[in-house]
Image (cartoon, rainbow, N blue to C red):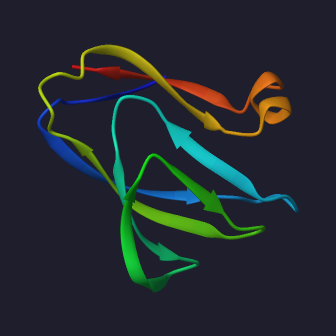
Amino acid sequence: MTSVRVGAYQHWSIVNRTAELHPFHIHQVHFLSYAENGVPLAHPAWLDTVNVPVGGTADVILDFTDPVIKGMAVFHCHLLNHEDKGMMAKILFK
């Protein structure tokens, strides 16, 4: 489990070391997807799911500033069989 302070922004670089595409998804918050494999995107976008390329990275800025977010949530691969096999983690909002 990881934890974050409500009221903060965080940069995450999501790494995919596999030979499969992984759609990363997080509950309760959105993020600005701004780079893929270290290359800035032509059109950064606010999302709650981003495809992390095969053998690559997705760089995002997560927005934890909404005071409505509380408690615990999860982030995971949005492919059900990957999620079911453990590609999921908890996040605690403090």
Residue at image x 83%, y 58%?
18
Figure label count: 0
Is 88 drawn above or below residue 52 in the view shown? above
Q: Position of residue 12 (x, y in %)?
A: 41, 55
Q: Which quadrant is home to the C terminus?
A: top left
Where on the picture, by quarter, is residue 61? Answer: bottom left
**Towards the viewer: 52 or 94:** 52
| 51 on left or right of 79 | left
59, above or below 48, in the image: below
Percent across and percent down for residue 40 are 43, 85
Question: Which residue shows up at 61% across the image and 35% down it?
Answer: 76
Outermost residue to the top? 71
Q: Which residue does the image show at 14% across and 38% down from the upper left?
A: 65
Left or right, 14 with reference to 51: left
Q: Position of residue 83 (x, y in %)?
A: 74, 29
- 94 or 49, which lies in front? 49
Does residue 26 lie above or below 41 as drawn? Answer: above
Apparent side of residue 76 relative to residue 53 in the rendered image (left or right): left
Figure quadrant of residue 64: top left
x, y percentage for residue 47? 42, 53
Vertical order, 38 against 83 (above or below)? below
Residue at the (37%, 67%) spot, across then down: 45
